[in-house]
Image (spheres, rainbow, N blue to C red):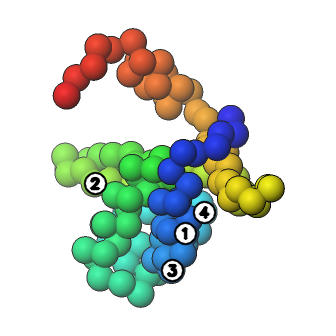
Amino acid sequence: MVETDPRNDQILELLSDDVVKRILTVTDQRATSAQGLDDYCDASLATIYRRIEDLLELGLLRERTEFQADGNHFKKFESNLECLAVSLDDGTLQVAVDRRDDAPNRLRTIWDAMQPGWE
């Protein structure tokens, strides 16, 4: 599903960050933990975590929890982008985001829409 995101400025600002670009390119190839991203990004782990949170908030990254046999668990992150396009049309800059649409995400969206507003 392609949509025009009302938060274009936030998306464009994030994409200008080298750490964000590395996170998206690495996680497009394979789900990776924040510690695993540390090997690819020239930034502190705290910065990597901040960028991950920004990407999650905008829906450009998704997380999953992996469990180990010993009971420990950790989060891995993967790109949620199929395609991202920036266009300039008649003086208006637009960002179109085509997110990966999988069954669990569709179900979560439907479920969330059926719930009363919790704050």
Residue flagged by tag 2: what amino acid is it? Phe
Task: Please name which of the two marks, 4 or 3, marks the residue nearer to the observer.
Answer: 3
Q: CA distance from mark 4 to mark 3?
A: 17 Å
At label 4, the amino acid type is Gln
Q: Which mark is in front, 3 or 2?
A: 3
**Reading the chain from its start, which is encountered first: label 3 or label 2?**
3
Q: Residue at x 44, y 62 (%)?
A: 32
Describe the element under mark 2 as helix, strand or loop. Answer: strand
Image x and y of residue 75, in percent: 32, 53
Circle nearer the viewer, 4 or 1: 1
The relative height of residue 23 versus residue 66 in the rendered view (above or below) is below
Look at the picture and state if 3 lies above or below 11.
Answer: above
Q: What is the x, y in percent for residue 68?
A: 28, 50
**Residue 107 percent coordinates (x, y):** 48, 22
**Does any portion of residue 31 appear in the rendered image?**
no
Judge the density around disc 2: few (<14), some (14-19), many (≥20) Cα neighbours within 10 Å: few
